[in-house]
Image (tube, rainbow, N blue to C red):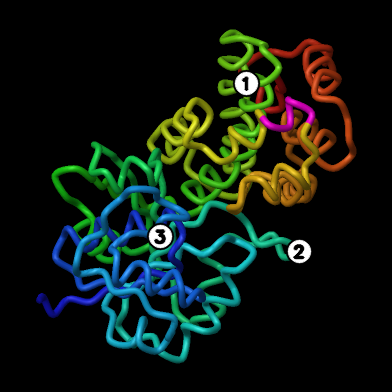
């Protein structure tokens, strides 16, 4: 066995898939979960059936419920907790973190209440600086990554050394990794695209066709860019893997939880029932509410996000939301404040 150790927190579908990439690249991977039965299944049957049906996991992944055992001695610690749980998981991990460990996260969302990005949450709880923090994002469904289908992602950090360390840790013949310095842009793009994917699922579920979805993706990208630029992002990021790349895959694939949730809402299923039936976190729902607040804070117009908020939380009929968007005043496409 190799002496290189990585820790992955937690053992959902994306965490498990990324643990498999690290294992393929020669790491001994400690995969942390709160669930004893899940840990036992991973260790004895080499499967994680609830999240990745039929996928066989590499032998050098060991699941544990012991945080000290998971994080202790790891040179790379990957956080893949839902945004709502990130701070709690980071608090648990902090006492066991190696001083020189590189910290990565692959979570796409903001913290409710504080509106903070995940790198900010991690920096606060782990008492670490930006030079050791990296975000991994891009068009990548766990179901395909774990099957070693060709996938390309981006890793972003304020430190090129940290980004390149993570690039080397993850890059394989099946999993290509680019580097980027724009942490803000990569995080904003990853979070907001989930909102647009909810809208894409609604649009498809209502039978609105390809024209409507193409418009939704295009104007959705405009919303992502406007908010990101206001928060200090590089505009070019939104034309890359974390921006248009992730937006396309999330809005067009049935692997996407957010797309599926939107499609179920279009069928008349209540939001509570949608979330219950999904059985996994649908980040776009929480992010819609948070992004709406952030947009108001920065004075950024996000009409798609606003109408999805009305559908999700104010019980506005989806068709009525589309009528509102289509009936907005005339604007120029490339004006900074333009809506759909």
Q: Which residue is rendered at x = 58% and y = 41% of the image?
A: 229
Question: Which residue in the structure is indicated by mark 1?
Answer: 216
Q: Earlier in the sequence, mark 2 or mark 3?
A: 3
Give the Cα separation between the discs numbered 1 and 2: 28 Å
User: To which residue does mark 2 refer?
Assistant: 113
Q: Please tell me whether the stretch drawn in magenta is mainly helix, strand or loop.
A: helix
Disc 1 + disc 2, Cβ < 8 Å:
no
User: Marks 3/1: CA distance?
Assistant: 29 Å
Indicate yes or no whether the magenta region holds residue 266: yes
Observer-side mark, 3 or 1, equals: 3
Tell me: 281 left or right of 127: right
Relative vertical location of residue 103 with respect to residue 12 in this rendering, above or below: below
| Residue 164 appearing in the image | no
Residue 113 to residue 291: above or below: below
Q: Which element type, helix, strand or loop, lies under badge 2? A: loop
Q: Position of residue 241 (x, y in %)?
A: 38, 37
Mark 3 residue crowding within 10 angstroms, few (<14) / some (14–19) / many (20+): many
Kindly tell me whether residue 323 is visible in this rendering. Answer: yes
Residue highlighted by disc 3: 15
Contact, mark 2 vs mark 3 (Cβ under 8 Å): no
Q: Earlier in the sequence, mark 1 or mark 2?
A: 2
Q: Nearer the viewer, residue 55 or 137?
A: 55
Q: Is residue 267 above or below residue 285?
A: above
Q: Nearer the viewer, residue 261 or 130?
A: 261
Image quadrant in which the C terminus is located: top right
Q: Which residues are magenta?
A: 264-268
Quarter holding residue 133: bottom left
- Say what secondary structure mark 1 lies in: helix
Residue 302 in the image: x percent, y percent?
73, 33
Q: Is residue 125 above or below residue 58?
A: below
Residue 105 in the image, given as x and y percentages of width and height: 43, 62
Question: In this image, 106 relative to 290: left or right?
Answer: left
């Amino acid at each position: 066995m190799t002496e290189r150790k990585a820790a992955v927190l937690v053992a959902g579908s994306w965490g498990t898939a990324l643990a498999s990439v690290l294992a393929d690249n020669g790491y001994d991977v400690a995969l942390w979960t709160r669930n004893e039965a899940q840990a036992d299944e991973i260790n004895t049957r080499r499967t994680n059936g609830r999240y990745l049906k039929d996928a066989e996991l590499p032998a050098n992944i060991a699941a544990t419920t012991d945080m000290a055992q998971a994080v202790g001695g790891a040179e790379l610690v990957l956080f893949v907790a839902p945004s709502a749980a990130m701070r709690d998981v980071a608090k648990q991990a902090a006492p066991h973190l190696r001083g020189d460990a590189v910290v990565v996260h692959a979570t796409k969302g903001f913290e409710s209440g504080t509106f903070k990005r995940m790198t900010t949450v991690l920096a606060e709880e782990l008492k670490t600086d930006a030079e050791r923090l990296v975000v991994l994002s891009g068009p990548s469904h766990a179901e395909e990554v774990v099957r070693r289908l060709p996938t390309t992602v981006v890793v972003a950090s304020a430190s090129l050394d940290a980004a390149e360390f993570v690039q080397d840790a993850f890059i394989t013949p099946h999993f290509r990794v680019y580097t980027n310095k724009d942490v803000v842009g990569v995080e904003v793009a990853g979070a907001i695209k989930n909102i647009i994917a909810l809208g894409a699922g609604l649009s498809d579920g209502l039978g609105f066709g390809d024209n409507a979805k193409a418009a939704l993706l295009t104007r959705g990208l405009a919303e992502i860019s406007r908010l990101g630029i206001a928060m200090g992002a590089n505009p070019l990021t939104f034309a890359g893997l974390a921006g248009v790349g992730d937006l396309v895959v999330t809005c067009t694939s049935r692997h996407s939880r957010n797309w599926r949730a939107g499609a179920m809402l279009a069928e008349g299923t209540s939001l509570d029932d949608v979330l219950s039936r999904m059985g996994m976190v649908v980040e776009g729902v929480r992010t819609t509410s948070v992004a709406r607040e952030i947009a108001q804070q920065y004075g950024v117009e996000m009409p798609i996000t606003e109408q999805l908020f009305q559908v999700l939380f104010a019980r506005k009929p989806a068709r009525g939301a589309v009528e509102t968007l289509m009936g907005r005043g005339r604007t120029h496409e490339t004006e900074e404040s333009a809506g759909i």
